[in-house]
Amino acid sequence: MIRIGMIVPSSNTTLEGTTTRLLAGRDDVTFVSTRIPVQAITADGSGARFDADVMVAAAGLLADAKVDVIVWNGTAGSWLGVDHDRAVCDAITSQTGLPATTSTLAILQACNDFGVTRLAIATPYTADVVERIIAEYERHGITTTAHADWGLTENYRFAARPREDVEALLLEACASGDPHAVALICTNVDGAVVSEAVEAKIGIPVIDSIAATLWWAMEVAGAPDASIQGWGAFLAQASFRHRARAVVTELRNSTGCDRTTLRVDDDRLGLHVDLCAAESCAEGVRSIQHDPTLDQRALETVRWIDETRRVLVQPAFTEHPFPPQALRDVYGVKAQVLGPVERDGAVTAWLSAHSLDERPWSPQDLAAMDTARAAVGELLEYR
């Protein structure tokens, strides 16, 4: 049993009930909570106590319950700064010996694992708080494409808005700017309950703060699988994407190539091969993760691995099967290795290692590809 300890804003009336509903199908995870003083959200910090000593005192109470992780279930770090949250986590761990994390760190981790660099933001906050959030996220490589806000200060009032208003807020936030995802930044507004409906309309993940915090707390606590079905693409995919990104990052580091990707067909996860499920790029290398323009199953190279079930090794593109011209002309790829992953008798996924220069692929490179293929196969079988 994994036990999560949550530090909750005192005026929050949403996150505990929502978290309980999200965990209804997980008999291996539970949580306990305690509270710190928060009445209002303002840019100057009045109306709330976000000091490390207040957090540490609350964490000490949670540690008495023998929890596996302590999480500050509030998004203050989004405007106070990630450094503030990291200092709080360090202080909690120093005092309790337990791993610690926060809602803001969870949201940023979600953006990292989903390859989100263009984010729509929905909040109940006032404009000055939102401006600070936008600036802080920009510091971490995330551009805000658009935002929608209620302009409220009193935390208790955030939870009073009906479900229809929450859905409208999310839809307004991502109505322009071509975002990769939309984030609801506040743990006193239930975005999880409308996530599936919103995703069906906009076709991108909804990163709800309550859902993201629960997911990342489970990951930090060491859950073998932190996915939750039935609450939208984010909770269904986040655990897989987090682990898959670790696989492609290790593959890129092992081979020294410029970009590695993973494409997956899995209806249960809601993943399809026209978009990458995971990607790792060397510094300065252009991402391909959110480009859906190619019909992947129709590509000559993909048909080859589907027919042969072998690893395709291409030190240069001098003979068939040729990759698509766009991969060469738009993204500058001059050599690649493709590694198929089979499941139930079909190629359900494949890994790609791209080089922006022609290069030989060594036996060590191919061994790294085989290791990555096996790792992805295990991830898919686990589900």
Image (tube, grey):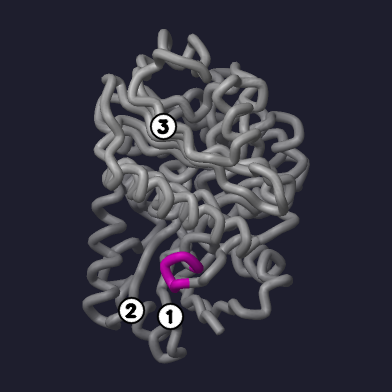
**Above or below: residue 216 compared with residue 62:** above
Return the residue at label 2: 98
State how far apart marks 3 and 2 are (Cα): 45 Å
User: Mark 3 Cα within 10 Å, few/some/many (few <14, many 20+)?
Assistant: some
Residue type beneath disc 2: Leu
The reply to whether discs 1 and 2 touch (Cβ–Cβ < 8 Å) is: yes
In the rendered structure, which disc, 3 or 2, sits on the residue that comes first in sequence? 2
Please provide the residue range marked out in magenta: 218-222
Label 1 sits on residue: 68
Residue 270 located within the stretch drawn in magenta: no
Q: Position of residue 60 (x, y in %)?
A: 34, 84
Q: Is residue 173 visible?
A: no
Identity of the residue drawn at 62% across and 49% down: 342
Q: Secondary structure at mark 2?
A: loop
Prevailing secondary structure of the magenta residues: helix
- Residue occupying the point 52% across, 34% down: 121
Give the distance between the C-alpha atoms of the residues marked 1 and 2, in whole angstroms: 7 Å
Which label was assigned to residue 134?
Answer: none
Amino acid type, label 3: Val
Kindly identify the amino acid type of the residue bearing the numbered disc 1: Asp
List the residue tagged with mark 3: 313
User: Residue 31: horizontal and vertical position, in percent?
Assistant: 56, 77
In the rendered image, which quarter contains the C terminus? Answer: bottom right
Q: Quadrant of residue 240?
A: bottom right
**Residue 207, image x and y in percent?**
56, 45
Compare marks 1 and 3 and give the one earlier in the sequence.
1
Q: Residues within 10 Å of mark 1 (few under 14, many from 20)?
A: many
Spot occupied by residue 295 in the image (x, y as percentages of width and height): 65, 21
Vertically, is 151 above or below 212? above
Q: Residue at x 47, y 60 (%)?
A: 216
Q: Which type of secondary structure does the marked residue at label 3 adopt?
A: strand
